[in-house]
Amino acid sequence: MHHFEYRDDTLYCEDIAVPRIARAVGTPFYLYSHATLERHFKAFDSGFEGFPHLTCFAVKACSNISILRLFGHLGGGADIVSGGELFRCLKAGIDPARIIYSGVGKTRAEMREALLARILMFNVESAQELDRLQEVAAELGTRAPVAFRVNPDVDPKTHAYISTGLAKNKFGIPVDEALAEYERARDMDNIEILGVSCHIGSQLTQIDPFIEALRKLKRFVARLEERGIAIRYLDLGGGVGITYDDEQPPHPHDYAAAVRSELGDMDVTLILEPGRVITGNAGILVTEVQYTKVNAGGEEEKRFVIVDAAMNDLTRPSLYGAYHEIQPVVRRNDGGEEVVDIVGPICETGDFMARDRCLPRVAQGDLLAIMSSGAYGFSMASNYNSRPRAAEVMVCGDRYHVIRRREEYDDLIVGEINVECS
Ligand code: LLP
């Protein structure tokens, strides 16, 4: 459930009419509902109440510091994958003791920063990474807390680009090799083994793959124990899907119940890394129709709605062929419907928000809401075609806050040096 709903044919975010914000901040802009963010975080986290756990929000899904701050206040931690995400979390006041660091390509500098910040643990993804972490920790005269991310070879049954837990994916260490890595790590002076982790993919709509992965992890932990290696943290990753169209993902409580029942009385602290399930449906992208046009030259007539948001603002439709529902911000109940492509101004045929979509007839100046844009929306935005990135706005009840101002032209060339080679 989210807090974007129509009142008298106008879309509201909580208690504010969306057109009012559009008039004040211009378009396009991302709009988040504070109440929805809070509700989704609590809905996820409360499923694990009574079991020792830590909900580490996957920062890559939505990384605005005001939003990270909110999750920190709600008792959450963070799952980071770069020094930049660590920087954001610290700015947002997230307790470093609740930060875990995933990702296959950590640099020495990033390791150093995370060690100095005293994060909870590194999810190590290769033998070479372990060696490097040992070296960096030794240089700093400290011990690096680690879990290994094992690759359980489970099919998450999701889009190929966001499936991560198959043996053919680049992520993690195969279960059989991981055992030897734990034994190596045990003998390293500057490594402290804390846990085991996995993440099998994103936008999962079934519970079974999670449970299959968890079973493999449990068996693995038992094998470690036989070798005298104790595990305190079990990190199950993220991946619970949301409804974009007609998907029926598990309710977070059902997911939690299945995980808890599989864990039984296992003596570990569970770590979860949800991203999309918390912010996905808590944000929309608001855009204005610039032009409508009909190209009648080809075999079939094509109708286009050209909006001021583009693939640089929301890349999911172009990159994954992802579906996002698109709704008029103000419903006009008289115009009928038509099948259109909703496209942006970027010079690529792949720049679309939706194709062959049946939409109430729209006109120049109308506002459209691209729904379910709160995860992997702004965080994947770029400046392609030298387009300043959109503003981000958060509504709290009957007030709104600009939590990231719209970029200006000067922002486009920050860091560029006007060199003339002669
Ligand atoms: N943990 C790790 C190690 C991850 O790699 C990810 C996502 C998550 C947690 C959070 O997964 P979530 O709960 O959000 O499914 N850009 C793609 C999604 C890429 C996901 C990458 N990893 C999209 O727009 O669909």
Image (cartoon, helix red, strand yellow):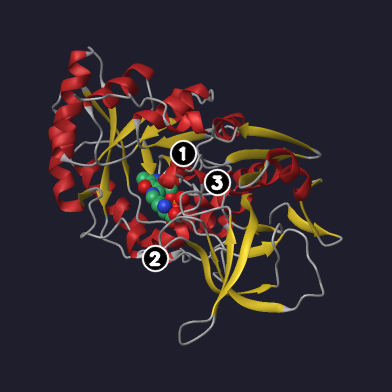
Residue toward you, 201 or 43: 201
**Neighbourhood count class around disc 1 (C-alpha, 10 Å): few under 14, some 14–19, many 20 upward:** many
Which amino acid, mark 1? Answer: Val
| Residue at (54% x, 25% y) in the render | 92
* Residue 144 visible to the viewer: no
**Residue 75 x/y as whole percent:** 57, 32
Tell me the quadrant of the picture where the C terminus can be found. top left
Task: Say whether residue 366 is left or right of residue 88.
Answer: right
| Label placed on residue 158 | 2
Residue at (61%, 45%) from the top-left corner? 30
On the image, the x and y values in percent for residue 62 come to 51, 42
Foreground: 260 or 348?
348
Q: Which residue matches tag 1?
A: 59
Where residue 221 appears, x then y in whole percent?
A: 28, 46
Q: What amino acid type should be assigned to the residue bearing mark 2?
A: Thr
Distance from label 3 to label 1 (Cα)? 20 Å
> In the displayed structure, would residue 335 be above or below residue 420?
below
**What residue is disc 3 on?**
48
Q: Which of the 4 image quadrants contains residue 306?
A: bottom right
- How far apart in space, not on screen, are marks 3 and 2 (Cα)? 25 Å
